[in-house]
Image (tube, rainbow, N blue to C red):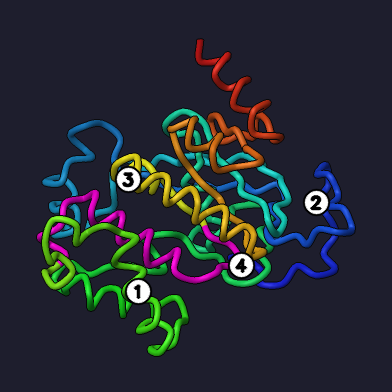
Amino acid sequence: MADTTIEGTPAPTGAPAPSDDRTPTVICDHVHIVYKVHGGSAGKGSATAALNRIVRRRPSAAVREVHAVKGVTFVAHKGEAIGLIGSNGSGKSTLLRAVAGLLPPAAGRVYTHGQPSLLGVNAALMNDLTGERNVVLGGLAMGMSRAEIRDRYPGIVDFSGINEKGDFVSLPMRTYSSGMAARLRFSIAAAKSHDVLMIDEALATGDRAFQKRSEARIRELREEAGTVFLVSHNNKAIRDTCDRVLWLEKGELVMDGPTEEVVAAYERSAG
């Protein structure tokens, strides 16, 4: 599980030492993430087979280990917006969950300064409650006071745009499209400053106007001395938002550097 303090922690072996004028917020030191998948073939992994194993109290016939992240090392600093790119299954989302403290490393360590917030987890929304109620609960989950939530509520709703075609904020979340729900999650998470904010594909939802608002808000969060991680398959969003990129493939860190340099190399590799 992630450590909560990194002051005085030396940079991990093989990683560049941070300069004196920058405060590290996340250190991943040769992090490995391994998880188990139960069920090998299609038959053994079916829902019916799983139910039968539970009823009969029998273990899975096949347990496969997946080495999702392999020895990843990097140091993130305050004020950085860091993009994570790579093909599907490269370990991007798994790495973010490890930084958030949701996945314990099988080897290596994760150190964080402050509380990392993973979009959609810290402000988890409930389908049976209205959008309005979810704004309140999401704000409380992120540590905001009720007074802060009242002050910021109109801005959250306006930013999300969910009321542009009706009074959707007063309706249950189950009536929302997936895009509307994703926009509301981002709006709640972006309503306060974060030590470390991690966003997984949130900018892929909504129209171009919402994406522009999201990119502008991420820049503001950086200026408020936070660190932002963005996972996206949209290279333009990465270019517009991030000043640094981590490129992962098959769980390994292929490249870590300035956005244009890394994204261009990634695009060349894709042909």
Question: At 75% from the left edge and 67% from the top edge, which residue is drawn?
Answer: 6
- Disc 2 is placed on an element classified as loop
- Disc 4 is placed on an element classified as loop
Contact between labelled residues 2 and 4, with CB atoms less than 8 Å apart: no
Task: Name above or below for residue 136 compared with residue 34.
Answer: below
The amino acid sitting under disc 1 is Gly
Q: Is residue 126 magenta?
A: no
Q: Crowdedness of circle 4 by 10 Å Cα count: few (<14), some, many (20+)?
A: many
Q: Which residue in the protein does label 4 denote? A: 195
Question: At 42% from the left edge and 65% from the top edge, which residue is drawn?
Answer: 189
Q: Earlier in the sequence, mark 2 or mark 1?
A: 2
Outermost residue, right side: 20
Outermost residue, top side: 271
Q: Crowdedness of circle 3 by 10 Å Cα count: few (<14), some, many (20+)?
A: some
Q: Earlier in the sequence, mark 4 or mark 3?
A: 3
Mark 4 against mark 2, which lies toward the viewer? Answer: 4
Q: Earlier in the sequence, mark 4 or mark 2?
A: 2
Q: Alpha-carbon distance for marks 2 and 1?
A: 35 Å
Mark 3 against mark 1, which lies toward the viewer? Answer: 1
Q: Which residue in the protein does label 3 denote? A: 38
Q: Alpha-carbon distance for marks 2 and 3?
A: 34 Å
User: Is 224 displayed left or right of 184 in the figure?
Assistant: right
Q: Crowdedness of circle 1 by 10 Å Cα count: few (<14), some, many (20+)?
A: many
Task: Locate residue 127, reporting x and y percent.
Answer: 17, 66
| Magenta-highlighted residues | 173-197
Numbered circle sitting on residue 12? 2
Instruction: Decide whether the magenta segment is chiefly helix, strand or loop.
Output: helix
Task: Locate residue 94, reporting x and y percent.
Answer: 48, 47
Q: Alpha-carbon distance for marks 3 and 1?
A: 33 Å
